[in-house]
């Protein structure tokens, strides 16, 4: 759209050129010779109309070939040149003008506004650059600026022309480049720096002009920088994308974990010659280059690399980095015929802290442990975290076992002192397994595995100590692996069986419920008790599968007994934290009950006390839903964990079962057991039911009945028995003599 003021300028003399555009002229001035070049007729016509409206009479050239013909035919003051054209491009026209040393001012009008494209155009002799789509005022201003330059040249003011060109070039670089742009003389001293140097490095330009580039290069990168800053080549052979560090006075924003005050830049440099066609020592003027800030990218790369090789909680090396260092240490020890030691360390009692005080406290304890362990090591040793509460230590260049014994003793001594965290006094010990090279293995995998075996040997025998690997331990480890393999096969083949122990009403002597207890019918070892394999199942992540297998069998058995006439019989099942935390736990449990013909009211869920210390937001809603459906929630083995009264009140609990260890104390104190008294008082205040297990003697029975225990369980009534013996137990009830003795 053309406004009225523009229309009024058609017959007016252009204000900036001093050359009448209508060809009439005043005095000695001649008409401005302008050539418009574009490969698209409609764009060329639009450009012609715009320039004509401002009082000029330009010629037109449709495409690069026609433009070269026009330039051969006539001398022009200004050429408005499209850069990207098929066939003969704008670059070809620029090269023709440079080759023929034409005096015209070429203004590139192009959509390619990249720094490299603009730089190349200016390098080839373009006077100015206007980006498409252009602003009419900007284009006319550029045109009139070029005409003004022509006037100055015509007047022979060569010095003023050079100043104008320099100002135009520098103005573009400063205003358009996000990078530090510099020029060096042939001796490597700065002759030009753009304003970006102050923002990136904190130096004023005046401080560095005339100074050698080495004054801003990081000392560690000087050799690398010398290759880049002394560049004399041009074109594709010149230096590009060289990464070095420069000294910086600028305080960087955000955390800088790895590089302090240095600034990483990507350097591009090329030689500058008085005549680009003659490149020799006598013609060399210096170096032109740019430096782009890549500190954020380098920081990100360092963080990613650190995360790949370090534990993020303790910032110690992880398993991958330790194995790399161990491989190097083995190679060095083999070459020097020396020994080295690998220690596998597992914390004792850490799980109790993590479960009772939460994962945040556990994380803080791990960091405190890591700090103490590092204080025990020599400068060349490596401490790594393998995950959880497991650490690995690499001790290169040890002479004898005694050297390792000293370090192991020092570690155990340091860890035996209490940790004070947020007002809590925490105690942990450590089980340490040691594998020596070459006696215990000559590869990193073998040494790590054998140190692990030695550590489990300590845990299995006494805890809190150290043990060197021996061949006998390998056999024990092999036995453990065999048990793990057999347990997985037992789950697949249905070799786990269920025994039941009655829970008896203290008032009537009748069996009100049966607790389902797992046994393993092993082909070689016979009937294996749960304490021999359940810890292994929990350790290797099979405990939830064991729970589900036991529950499926128990649901079927109890469903059959209820259908046979014992319709009030209930089933108590143990639920592990691993099963309870599964996403679809409640739905699967209800579906399994329905498949066996049971309703939720016929089942009791027995949860270990430490379950209360797990994720309340996940567990509590699931228990509430099952209780709403009719299930009974019982806390098993109460008193052996670390739960608080506040935690107890957050769960939908119906009853508490006293652990057999406290019931056993009744035998030694006929007057009662203080812990049981406390549990009884708590249950009364919270209106919870009270059960007890492990009842073996009449005096225990009498004491528990006196305390208000409503249900009892133990060998006094019946040991756990196989399913085919339950019918006989149900037929013999009630247990009148025992209940009478209790009463």
Image: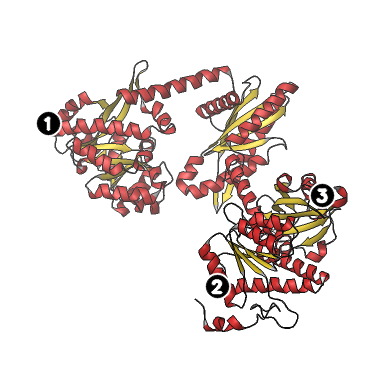
- Mark 1 neighbour class, 10 Å CA radius: few under 14, some 14 to 19, many 20 or more: few
Nearer the camera: disc 1 or disc 3: 3
Tell me if label 1 and label 3 are in contact, CB under 8 Å: no
Image quarter where the C terminus lies is top left
Direction from residue 124 to residue 640 in the image, left or right: left
SS at mark 2? helix
Q: Nearer the viewer, residue 130 or 525?
A: 130
- Mark 2 neighbour class, 10 Å CA radius: few under 14, some 14 to 19, many 20 or more: some
Tell me if label 3 and label 2 are in contact, CB under 8 Å: no
Colour convention: secondary structure
Q: Which residue is mark 1?
A: 564
Residue 49, numbered circle: 2
Measured as percent of width and height from the top left, residue 525 is found at 37, 17
Residue 278, numbered circle: 3
Q: Let me know if residue 59 appears in the view.
A: yes
Measured as percent of width and height from the top left, residue 482 is found at 44, 20
Going 84% across and 47% down the picture, which residue do you hit?
280
Direction from residue 393 to residue 500 in the image, left or right: left
Direction from residue 218 to residue 51 in the image, left or right: left
Task: Please determine whether, in this image, residue 704 is positioned above or below residue 542.
Answer: below
Going 78% across and 64% down the picture, which residue do you hit?
205
């Amino acid at each position: 759209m053309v406004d009225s003021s523009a229309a009024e300028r058609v017959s007016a003399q252009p204000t900036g050129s001093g050359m009448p555009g209508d060809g009439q002229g005043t005095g000695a001035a001649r008409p401005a010779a302008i050539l418009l070049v574009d490969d698209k007729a409609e764009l060329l016509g639009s450009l012609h109309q715009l320039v004509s409206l401002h009082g000029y009479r330009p010629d037109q050239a449709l495409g690069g070939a026609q433009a070269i013909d026009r330039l051969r035919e006539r001398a022009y003051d200004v050429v408005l040149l499209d850069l990207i054209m098929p066939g003969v491009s704008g670059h070809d026209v620029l090269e023709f003008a440079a080759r023929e040393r034409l005096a015209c001012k070429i203004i590139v009008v192009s959509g390619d506004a990249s720094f490299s494209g603009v730089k190349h155009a200016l390098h080839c002799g373009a006077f100015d650059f206007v980006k498409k789509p252009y602003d009419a005022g900007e284009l006319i201003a550029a045109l009139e600026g070029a005409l003004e330059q022509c006037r100055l040249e015509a007047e022979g003011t060569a010095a003023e022309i050079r100043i104008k060109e320099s100002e135009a070039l520098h103005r573009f670089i400063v205003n358009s480049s996000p990078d530090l742009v510099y020029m060096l003389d042939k001796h490597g001293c700065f002759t030009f720096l753009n304003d970006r140097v102050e923002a990136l490095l904190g130096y004023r330009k005046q401080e560095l002009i005339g100074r050698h580039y080495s004054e801003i290069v990081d000392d560690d990168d000087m050799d690398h920088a010398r290759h880049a800053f002394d560049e004399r080549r041009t074109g594709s052979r010149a230096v590009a994308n060289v990464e070095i560090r420069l000294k910086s006075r600028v305080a960087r924003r955000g955390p800088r974990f790895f590089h302090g005050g240095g600034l990483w830049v990507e350097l591009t440099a090329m030689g500058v010659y008085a005549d680009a066609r003659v490149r020799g020592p006598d013609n060399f003027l210096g170096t032109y280059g740019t430096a782009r800030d890549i500190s954020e990218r380098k920081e990100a790369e360092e963080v990613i690399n650190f995360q790949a090789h370090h534990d993020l909680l303790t910032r110690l090396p992880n398993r991958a980095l330790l194995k790399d260092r161990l491989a190097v240490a083995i190679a060095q020890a083999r070459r020097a015929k020396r020994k080295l030691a690998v220690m596998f360390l597992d914390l004792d009692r850490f799980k109790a802290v993590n479960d009772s005080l939460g994962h945040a406290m556990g994380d803080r304890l791990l960091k405190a442990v890591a700090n103490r362990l590092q204080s025990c090591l020599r400068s060349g040793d490596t401490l790594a975290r393998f995950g959880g509460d497991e650490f690995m230590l690499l001790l290169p260049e040890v002479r004898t076992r005694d050297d390792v014994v000293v370090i192991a003793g020092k570690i155990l001594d340091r860890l035996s002192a209490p940790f004070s965290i947020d007002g809590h006094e925490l105690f942990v010990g450590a089980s340490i397994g040691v594998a020596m090279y070459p006696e215990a293995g000559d590869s990193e995998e073998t040494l790590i595995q054998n140190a692990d075996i030695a550590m489990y040997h300590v845990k299995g025998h006494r805890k809190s100590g150290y043990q060197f690997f021996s061949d006998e331990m390998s056999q024990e480890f092999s036995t453990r692996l065999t048990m793990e393999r057999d347990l997985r096969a037992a789950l697949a083949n249905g070799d786990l069986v269920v025994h039941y122990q009655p829970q008896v009403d203290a008032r009537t002597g009748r069996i009100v419920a049966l607790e389902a207890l797992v046994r393993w019918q092993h082909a070689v070892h016979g009937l294996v008790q749960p304490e021999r394999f359940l810890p292994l199942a929990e350790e290797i992540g099979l405990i939830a599968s064991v729970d589900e297998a036991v529950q499926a069998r128990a649901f079927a058995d109890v469903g059959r007994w209820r259908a046979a006439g014992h319709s009030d019989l209930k089933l108590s099942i143990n639920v592990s934290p691993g099963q309870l935390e599964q996403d679809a736990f409640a739905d699967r449990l209800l579906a399994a009950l329905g498949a066996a013909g049971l309703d939720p009211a016929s089942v009791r869920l027995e949860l270990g006390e430490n379950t209360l210390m797990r994720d309340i937001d996940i567990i509590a809603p699931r228990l509430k839903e099952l209780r709403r459906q009719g299930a009974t929630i019982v806390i098993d083995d109460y008193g052996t964990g670390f739960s608080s009264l506040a935690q107890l009140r957050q769960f939908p609990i119906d009853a508490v079962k006293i652990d057999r260890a406290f019931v056993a104390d009744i035998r030694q104190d006929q007057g009662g057991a203080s812990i049981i008294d406390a549990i009884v008082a708590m249950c009364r205040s919270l209106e919870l039911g009270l059960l007890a297990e492990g009842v073996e003697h009449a005096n225990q029975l009498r004491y528990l009945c006196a305390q208000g225990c409503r249900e009892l369980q133990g060998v006094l009534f019946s040991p756990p028995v196989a399913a085919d013996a339950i019918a006989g137990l149900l037929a013999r009830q009630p247990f009148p003599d025992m209940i009478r003795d209790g009463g």
